[in-house]
Amino acid sequence: MTTVSTHVLDAQLGRPAAGMAISLALADGSTRAAATDADGRIRFADEVPPGTHTLQFATGAWYAEQGRATFYPSVTVTFTVTEGEHHHVALLLSPFAYTTYRGS
């Protein structure tokens, strides 16, 4: 089964980014929306087809809810899914920088 998950960490505070809205846009044009749990994680339940997909992280709204400023109103990560594997896309976030990597 091919699946996608993400984990967002607030590197400035050293805590999970709980409650962040994230949208997964699939290659076929459909989307799936969710928000990170208390541990900053989302695992999209439905199988994801192979192809190039995009995760859109609503960083600006998330920071605004906390009364914090950020340089990035959103972060977009485009990645390629191969059949039969789990794909974990992690985001380490601070107000003026971010990094992403494929986790496990």
Image (cartoon, rainbow, N blue to C red):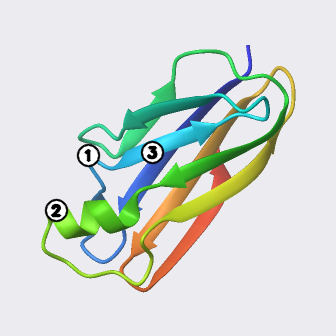
- In the picture, the disc for residue 19 is 1
The residue where tag 3 is placed is 22
Residues 3 and 20: in front is 20
Residue 104 visible in the shown view? no
Q: How far apart are marks 1 and 3 (CA)?
A: 9 Å
Q: Do the residues labelled 2 and 1 touch (CB within 8 Å)?
A: yes
Name the spot of residue 19 as percent of width and height, x first.
26, 46
Q: Residues within 10 Å of mark 2 (few under 14, many from 20)?
A: few
Could you tell me residue 23's position as x and y percent?
A: 51, 41
How many residues crowd around disc 1 within 10 Å: few (fewer than 14), some, or many (20 or more)?
Answer: some
Residue type at mark 1? Gly
Residue 30 lies, in percent from the top left, at: 65, 28
Quadrant (top left, top right, bottom left, bottom right) of the N terminus: top right
In the image, what residue occupies the spot 62% across and 41% down?
88
Q: Is mark 1 on a helix, strand or loop?
A: loop
Q: Mark 2 points at which residue?
A: 65
User: Earlier along the polypeptide chain: callout 2 or callout 1?
Assistant: 1
